[in-house]
Amino acid sequence: MNSEDINRMWLQSQDDAEGMRLGFTTQQHYFAALVAAAERKRLHDKFMEIHKSQQHSNNYWHFAARKIMEEPDVA
């Protein structure tokens, strides 16, 4: 993820916040969720790449890739 990706997600959160009539604090939470989802996707793809490069299919990279895409617990 680079600065262009971050800027794009910030602009998306602004547009979405206006459409949903969200306040600034809620927009910040929405933006953080967008960034977190993008990072989970990046890690998932990387783990799957490692999994597919392994000589045997019985490894933990596939398990980690699946788990990282699960929705996190919200406190």
Image (cartoon, helix red, strand yellow):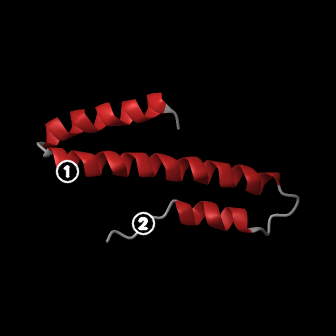
Q: Residues within 10 Å of mark 2 (few under 14, many from 20)?
A: few
Identify residue for label 1. 26
**Circle 1: residue type:** Thr
Mark 1 or 2, closer to the camera: 1
- Whole-percent x and y of residue 64? 63, 65
Q: Residues within 10 Å of mark 1 (few under 14, many from 20)?
A: few
Q: Residue drawn 68% across and 53% down? A: 48
Q: Is residue 46 above or below residue 16?
A: below
Residue 72: assigned label: 2
- Whole-percent x and y of residue 43? 59, 52
Total residue callouts: 2
Which SS class for mark 2? loop
- Whole-percent x and y of residue 20? 15, 43
Which SS class for mark 1? helix
Q: Image check: 34 left or right of 21? A: right
Query: Label 1 to label 2, Cα distance in Å?
Result: 18 Å
Q: Image check: 52 left or right of 27? A: right
Mark earlier in primary sequence (1, 2): 1
